[in-house]
Image: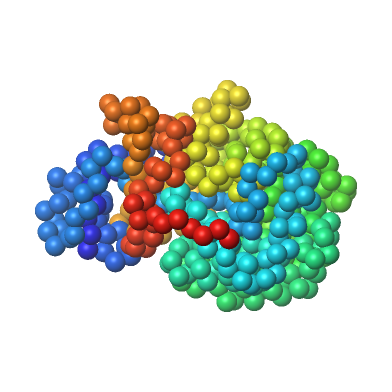
Amino acid sequence: MQLFRASIVHFPHQTHTPDDDAIFFEDGALVIRNDTIVDVGVYAEIQNLYPEAQLHDHRGKWILPGFIDSHLHYPQTEIIGQYGKQLLHWLETYTFPTEKRFSERDYAERIAAVFLRQLLKNGTTTGLVFSTVHQSATETLFEQASQLNMAMVTGKVCMDRNCPDYLMDSPALAQRESAELIERWHGKGRNLYALTPRFAPTSSEAQMAALGELAQQYQDVFIQTHLSENLDEIAWVKSLYPDQDGYLAVYDKYHMVRSRAVFGHCVHLTDEEWQRLHDANASVAFCPTSNLFLGSGLFDLAKAQASQVHLTLASDVGGGTGFNLLRTYGEGYKICQLRHTAYSPLHGLYSMTQGAAIAHQLSHSIGNLNPGTHADFVILQPAFDELTQLRLADSRDPQDMIFAMSMLGDDRAIFETWVAGECVYAKQEEMPYAMV
């Protein structure tokens, strides 16, 4: 049993008003036994209840739930920050040639290791991750996440048109390999599977139908894809699916708009599409850094809130420009400023913790610090250099701390990351990594 003393903030329940419903303990205690949270509260009230617990005194630091990144691409780790134009140019110039290399198992293993280290170094303990078209690359990520006991949601990308021949599968192969991966990995340990058509333009109607059959057969698997990221993309979908009323309708036709369906971007949705997402209990992954980097547009947070659609936050690495979700929130804040919409720091934190967990039907396990959940949490050291020490010298407010980190913070603010009761990243123990 271990007891951690620090300032603590989390959201124990679902809420539409994160600013009002965050739980904050300025001098708090988090108690864990093995891989599970046992208690959380005020240190003075808890310390004597667990006299046998090993004390970790982190006064001056903060404990938050482990972050949940709801949309990112592990094969694109190495192309982050490449100069690009917009979405379709990015795919053709960088993404597809890079993903070709993941047919080599050794190469996939090397990049998966870097990818997971970067997540943990930035406090992210769960990801909804796109793999490549290669079944073995997906196996590799599941295997390495399992070694860390991480909650990982991933899936083989499916494409049978409008992509290079070397990345093309078929309707039958996509269905067979996806089904094999579901049977082998979904619900095994902390692994969960996501059916992953890259996006409608790269899947034929036959492939979409084949994946739709799996979506009906396996009701509790995830579905992850892209939706209305770019205006040229939307026009392309219309030309490929002229009989459908819109982009979302394509996925809807094939039984992919439902609970545990996570649609990345959603920058240019119609009112009817927002309503359909709400009615289906589906989720939207807000990807501010990639939307800005690729010039896709300004996400409409006010519309998402008015529609009461599940909103999650996502880095979208490698079109996104960093793994740090606090900084990702900061870019989301700027987008909302341009839209004259409030996106408070606590709302941002909710989008990457409990709000995401509820959207993904995982709040019994992750996203909060409730007793009985897995001990996935982050220890932040917000005053990590001269400037942040000056900025936060007189601040004890969680809103202020989170906002400062969204503008000034980076991985240096992550002191430790814990997954299932094990410290899997410690700032003071970090060693230089060899170039891959």
Q: Is residue 9 above or below residue 302?
A: below
Q: Nearer the viewer, residue 224 or 271?
A: 224
Q: Position of residue 71 (x, y in %)?
A: 59, 51
Residue 398 visible in image = no
Residue 331 visible in image = yes
Q: Residue at x 57, y 65 (%)?
A: 110
Q: Please indicate whether residue 204 sits to the left or right of residue 379 in the image.
A: right
Q: Please indicate whether residue 53 sits to the left or right of residue 390 in the image.
A: left
Q: Is residue 378 above or below residue 384?
A: below
- Quadrant where the C terminus sits is bottom right
Here the colouring is rainbow
Q: Is residue 66 above or below residue 289?
A: below
Q: Nearer the viewer, residue 212 or 202?
A: 202
Q: Position of residue 394 (x, y in %)?
A: 27, 26
Q: Position of residue 269 (x, y in %)?
A: 70, 38
Q: Position of residue 265 (x, y in %)?
A: 65, 43
- Quadrant where the N terminus sits is bottom left
Q: Residue at x 82, y 60 (%)?
A: 164
